[in-house]
């Protein structure tokens, strides 16, 4: 959906800005800096997507820093239902490892920011993403798609500050109310889906992360010695029940997060290829959605026809890349989602799992739409499968290989 608005392109005409605000050092400085540079009104907006940061008093803090108004919006259920669950249905895994916890949250945060900007008749939106990362792209593609005439302010691409020390000095000079603590050894991002770590010693891909870095999951070595059995029920590719209990999407992810964290599930350490061309090492904790991905994929194995499953697997790679690159609202992602969701009509049933020391082990699966035929698969029964038919099939299937061998393998 497009949100049209008519605004002049001249940045000097900015009178009101909606800032994506967290209350930390960066966005506190940005709030003051934008007011100072553009001589404009700034409205602070914080999206609660399950980051579990302290939101109490955030509105008051934003106003003390100079905001004319502050929004704190609970988006956890919308995030789980309309962003995480579609990604689970689509088997969205970037470069076969990363479950896209940060990537999926940014379009929703930016979408709500645009809605507030239009409701407030603002001229511009502002974010605190740096010029080296992916988030600047994710925010700005959403802005450009949903409200193409809104101006975009990206301070990290405009100002001369080089890092945290410059921000601290500026905050002191300008009397910006921030609580300055020793610099964290890692850059972290948290939401309902995951917790990520970058920077510090992680910038050396040979260095093993220290155990005290992990704030969510226990190490597999310290996980319970007794495994835990669970059952997850799906309807149309969406997890709806945990051990027979109905749960909303956000409740489901939260409950599985607790279980996964307890059993040391969902840790990965990867070097990924950023959209801007930089290789970046990141460590992620994604306990609940790791369980969901494994359970959902297993249920697809008995409910999707072979060639349809293979086609979906091929398209899922492209689908994950679109999400990683910030193209959630693109025609390509939406069209792929329509195809994906069409395949999910038959992905109904229950998956039985064992959680044990970092592992998610599938114990069983059942579905009213199962394509599994025990009489065909059995070594004891023939069913309607005539083994003699395989001879002709193999002869025809192998004909191209037989011909190619005469030339290709002889060279």
Image (cartoon, grey):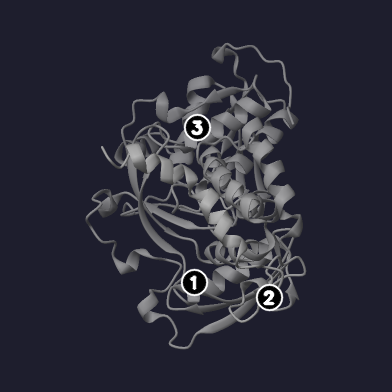
Q: Which residue is mark 1?
A: 261
Q: Which residue is mark 3?
A: 137
Q: Position of residue 10 (x, y in %)?
A: 57, 11
Q: Position of residue 404 (x, y in %)?
A: 39, 40
Q: Quadrant of the N terminus?
A: top right
**Near-viewer residue (135 or 361):** 361
**Near-viewer residue (324 or 371):** 371
**Near-viewer residue (361 or 241):** 361
Q: Position of residue 240 (x, y in %)?
A: 73, 66
Tell me the CA gap for discs 3 and 2. Answer: 52 Å
Residue 251 in which image quadrant: bottom right
**Quick one: label 2, few (<14), some, or many (20+) residues within 10 Å?**
few
Choose the circle earlier in sequence order: 2 or 1.
Answer: 1
Give the residue at x 72% y 29%. 118
Q: Callout 1: helix, strand or loop?
A: helix
Tell me the CA gap for discs 1 and 3. Answer: 31 Å
Give the residue at x 63% y 33%. 332
Q: Which residue is mark 2?
A: 375
Q: Quadrant of the C terminus?
A: top left
Mark 3 and 2 residues: CB-CB less than 8 Å, in contact? no
- Dot label at residue 92: none
Mark 2 and 1 residues: CB-CB less than 8 Å, in contact? no
Q: Position of residue 200 (x, y in %)?
A: 28, 51
Vertical relation: 318 (above or below) 14: below
Q: Callout 3: helix, strand or loop?
A: helix
Give the residue at x 70% y 35%. 116
Give the residue at x 74% y 48%. 342
Choose the circle earlier in sequence order: 3 or 2.
Answer: 3
């Amino acid at each position: 959906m497009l949100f049209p608005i008519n605004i002049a392109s001249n940045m000097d005409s900015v009178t009101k800005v909606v800032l994506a605000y967290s209350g930390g050092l960066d966005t506190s400085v940005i709030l003051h800096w934008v007011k100072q540079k553009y001589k404009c009104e700034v409205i602070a907006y914080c999206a609660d997507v399950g980051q579990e940061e302290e939101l109490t008093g955030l509105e008051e803090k934003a106003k003390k820093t100079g905001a004319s108004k502050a929004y704190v919006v609970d988006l956890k259920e919308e995030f789980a239902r309309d962003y995480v669950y579609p990604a689970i249905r689509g088997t969205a895994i970037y470069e076969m490892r990363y479950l896209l916890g940060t990537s999926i949250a940014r379009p929703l945060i930016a979408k709500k920011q645009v809605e507030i900007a239009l409701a407030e008749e603002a001229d511009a939106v502002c974010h605190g993403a740096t010029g080296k990362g992916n988030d600047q792209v994710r925010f700005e593609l959403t802005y450009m798609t949903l409200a193409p005439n809104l101006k975009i302010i990206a301070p990290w691409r405009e100002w001369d500050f080089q890092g945290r020390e410059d921000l601290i000095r500026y905050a002191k000079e300008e009397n910006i109310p921030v609580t300055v603590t020793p610099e964290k050894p890692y850059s972290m991002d948290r939401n309902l889906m995951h917790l990520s770590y970058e920077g510090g010693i992680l910038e050396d891909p040979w260095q093993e992360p220290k155990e005290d870095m992990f704030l969510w999951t226990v190490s597999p070595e310290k996980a319970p010695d007794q495994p835990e059995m669970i059952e997850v029920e799906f309807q149309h590719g969406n997890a709806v029940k945990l051990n027979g209990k109905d749960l909303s999407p956000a409740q489901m992810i939260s409950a599985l997060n607790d279980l996964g964290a307890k059993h040391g599930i969902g840790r990965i350490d990867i070097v990924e290829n950023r959209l801007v061309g930089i290789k970046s090492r990141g460590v992620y904790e994604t306990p609940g959605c790791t369980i969901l991905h494994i359970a959902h994929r297993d249920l697809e194995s008995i409910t999707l026809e072979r060639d349809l499953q293979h086609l979906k697997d091929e398209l899922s790679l492209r689908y994950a890349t679109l999400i990683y690159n910030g193209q959630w609202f693109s025609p390509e992602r939406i069209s792929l989602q329509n195809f994906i969701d069409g395949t999910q009509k038959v992905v109904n049933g229950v998956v039985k799992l064992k959680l044990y020391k970092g592992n998610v082990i599938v114990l069983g699966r059942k579905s009213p739409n199962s394509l599994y035929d025990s009489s065909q698969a059995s070594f004891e029964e023939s069913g309607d499968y005539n083994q003699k038919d395989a001879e002709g099939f193999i002869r025809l299937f192998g004909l191209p290989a037989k011909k190619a061998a005469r030339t290709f393998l002889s060279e």
